[in-house]
Image: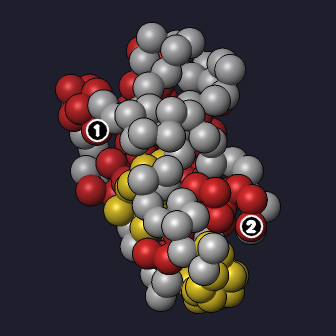
């Protein structure tokens, strides 16, 4: 299989990797760069477990070909450790008890990050709509919405 070298910024760090041209961004993030916070869920763009930010826009990394990251800025849940808004969201998730099995949490936190960037003080309905593409099997979403609402008020 043909390989391509790509250069991009990963969580603020200039990164160069060689990847098969058909490798997904999710596979690259997990298997090439070693960042395992981004989860493989459905592999079809339906669950949101693999959500990342590409140039500040949330996308399902399982549907993105890794070479599309060339020259771009990729942010994973690990990258939010240096982001004040990301840290605020993570703290709110813990305090609200919005983390149970934690499988959906990285994607939810990334999606919440984009939502609050676009709408700093969303209504509960806007929060619910903002996380529609991210599935959770444990919480029933109430605590997740509570967490995002709380983070928006800080």
Residue 64, above or below 115: below
> Residue shown at 50%/40% (left/top)?
43
> Residue shown at 69%/82% (left/top)?
17
Residue 25, above or below 55: above
Alpha-carbon span between mark 1 and mark 2: 30 Å
> Residue shown at 49%/50% (left/top)?
62
Please state the horizontal and vertical placement of residue 83, each as a whole percent of the image. 58, 63
Q: Which residue is mark 1?
A: 130
Tell us which disc is closer to us: 1 or 2: 2
**SS under mark 1:** helix
Taking the image as drawn, is residue 84 in sight? no
For the image, the number of numbered tags is 2
Q: Residues within 10 Å of mark 1 (few under 14, many from 20)?
A: some
Quadrant of the image containing the N terminus: bottom right
Please state the horizontal and vertical placement of residue 147, each as a whole percent of the image. 48, 29
Residue 133, above or below 29: above
Residue 92, above or below 116: above
Rendering quarter of residue 4: bottom right
Please state the horizontal and vertical placement of residue 135, each as a whole percent of the image. 44, 26
In the picture as drawn, the residue positioned furthest to the front comes out as 1
Residue 32: numbered disc = 2
In the picture as drawn, the residue positioned furthest to the right comes out as 34
> Residue shown at 57%/23% (left/top)?
98
Q: Is residue 61 left or right of residue 118?
A: right
Residue 138: numbered disc = none
Please state the horizontal and vertical placement of residue 79, each as a whole percent of the image. 63, 63
* Front in this rendered view, residue 93 or 132: 132
Q: Is residue 26 left or right of residue 152?
A: right
Taking the image as drawn, is residue 30 in sight? yes
**SS under mark 2:** helix
* Front in this rendered view, residue 78 or 45: 45
């Amino acid at each position: 299989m043909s390989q391509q070298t790509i250069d991009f910024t990963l969580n603020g760090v200039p990164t160069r990797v060689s990847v098969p041209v058909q490798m997904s961004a999710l596979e690259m993030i997990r298997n090439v760069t070693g960042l395992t916070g981004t989860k493989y869920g459905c592999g079809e763009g339906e669950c949101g477990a693999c959500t990342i930010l590409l140039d500040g826009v949330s996308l399902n990394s399982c549907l993105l070909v890794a070479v599309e990251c060339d020259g771009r800025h990729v942010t994973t849940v690990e990258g939010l450790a240096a982001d004040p808004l990301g840290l605020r969201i993570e703290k709110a998730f813990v305090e609200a008890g919005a983390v149970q099995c934690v499988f959906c949490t990285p994607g939810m936190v990334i999606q919440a990050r984009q939502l609050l960037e676009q709408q700093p003080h969303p209504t509960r309905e806007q929060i619910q709509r903002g996380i529609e593409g991210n599935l959770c099997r444990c919480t029933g979403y109430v605590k997740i919405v509570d967490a995002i609402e709380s983070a928006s008020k800080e």
